[in-house]
Image (cartoon, grey):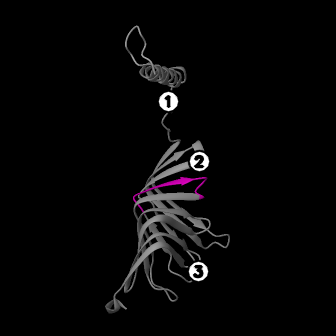
Amino acid sequence: MQNNPENNTPVWLTLIMAAAAVVLLSGAILFYRHFFLHPAVIKKPLTPSSIITGADLLALTPQGQKDYHFTASLTYQYDKDNMRTFTQPHAQYYKPNQAPWQLKADHGVSLNNNQLIHLNGNVWLHQAAGKNNKAVTLTSSKMTVEPNNKLAYNKVLTHVQEPGLTVSAVGFHANLKTNVVHLLSQTHAEYDSTND
């Protein structure tokens, strides 16, 4: 390539500088259009429609038997998405002729009129020993519960303890009606025969 006779700059360097200027100008135009012509929408914080301290709910089956019992130290109800947030939620799910499943956590959020509850922080799911089952305790940092279907599950590290057995797994699915717990992956068990 030949040099430009007026300033001794190689033509290839002039072309690169021109391309860089076009890229920079295009970036500046996009930046201006994104941030100045379409400013970010500032979302208003959610305002609760009600605040409940010491919530205590007992739900019965159509036959008048206990279905579940739910308490929380503090509950915020939001009209948007029919959402509730809970501090220190505690629930018991009942089934005839069995010890109830108990559930505790530091915090929770329910969606769709309590159809789905997301729990986090020191989540504890426990069923005491009964005629047909050993005691079992599941602990995790997160858990999702479907109260109407009596299902609990997650996809994070979970510890399961039964007498003489401790299991760690990533993820689980528990059917609280049938007492069946499926561990999903990376399962590691430790057996202690002295605790049978």
Q: CA distance from mark 3 to mark 1?
A: 51 Å
- Within the magenta stretch, is there residue 149? no
Q: Residues within 10 Å of mark 3 (few under 14, many from 20)?
A: few
- Nearer the observer, 172 or 37: 37
Residue 75 picture location, percent across and down:
47, 51
Query: Label 2 amino acid?
Result: Asn
Q: Which residue lies under the disc numbered 1?
A: 42
Q: Residue at x 49, y 64 (%)?
A: 155
- Within the magenta stretch, is there residue 107? yes
Which of the two discs, 3 and 2, labels the residue nearer the N terminus?
2
Q: Residue at x 39, y 16 (%)?
A: 9
Q: Which residue lies under the disc numbered 3?
A: 96
- Nearer the observer, 59 or 124: 124
Q: Secondary structure at mark 3?
A: loop
From the image, state whether disc 2 or disc 1 is nearer to you. 1
Residue 184 picture location, percent across and down:
51, 72
From the image, state whether disc 3 or disc 1 is nearer to you. 1
Which of the two discs, 3 and 1, labels the residue nearer the N terminus?
1
In the picture, measured across the screen, residue 79 lies left or right of residue 133, that is right
Q: Secondary structure at mark 1?
A: loop
The segment highlighted magenta reads 105-115
* Residue furthest top in the image: 6
Residue 136 picture location, percent across and down:
44, 79
Q: CA distance from mark 2 to mark 1?
A: 22 Å
Q: Which residue lies under the disc numbered 2?
A: 82
- Nearer the observer, 192 or 19: 19
Which of the two discs, 2 and 1, labels the residue nearer the N terminus?
1
